[in-house]
Amino acid sequence: MNANPSHDDRETCARHSRGFTLLEVLVAVAILAALLYVVPRSLVSARVSIAQSQAWLEARLVAEEVLAEELQGKTMRPGSLGGVSHGRRWSATITPSAVADGRGPEGQILLEARLSVEVSPSRSLAVDRILLGMAE
């Protein structure tokens, strides 16, 4: 074998080391443009989804707090209640339960409570519960 590369070998090496073709550059730019279009949109939609999930979770926690503190006790009577807890408006409508006609011990009756907590200006979380309360 000859230690000196032949003319054809040098030409082949030179051809391969010239750089990228125009077609290769255009394909790379097209792929980059597609990625720059898709990635920010998916990040924005993920951020919106996380914010919505957090708002629903906060509303659920407010509902649980209201049910545990405001809508418990032997003095609960049919009617409407409302308020603000942790910056979220809530309202509750309490009606006698259609499930039980009889009275419990000490004149208590079953009440149906429909609690609504504002998640956003256009959406609210609704929770239905059966409570023990006093007759009217």
Image (tube, rainbow, N blue to C red):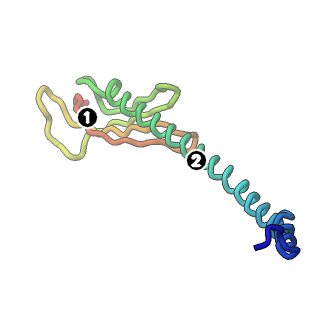
Numbered mark located on residue 131 in the image: 1
Q: Residues within 10 Å of mark 2 (few under 14, many from 20)?
A: few
Q: Which residue is mark 2?
A: 46
Q: Amino acid at mark 1?
A: Leu
Q: Residues within 10 Å of mark 1 (few under 14, many from 20)?
A: many
Relative image position of residue 67 (x, y in whole percent): 34, 31
Q: Is residue 22 visible?
A: no
Left or right of 54 in this view: 113: left
- Rendered residue at 26%/30% (across/down): 136
- Rendered residue at 51%/38% (across/down): 55
Relative image position of residue 79 (x, y in whole percent): 36, 32
- Which of 26/100 is in front? 26
Q: Amino acid at mark 2?
A: Ala
Numbered mark located on residue 14 in the image: none
102 vs 1: above or below:
above
107 vs 116: above or below:
above
Quadrant where the image shows the N terminus? bottom right
Relative image position of residue 46 (x, y in whole percent): 58, 47
- Label 2: state its secondary structure: helix
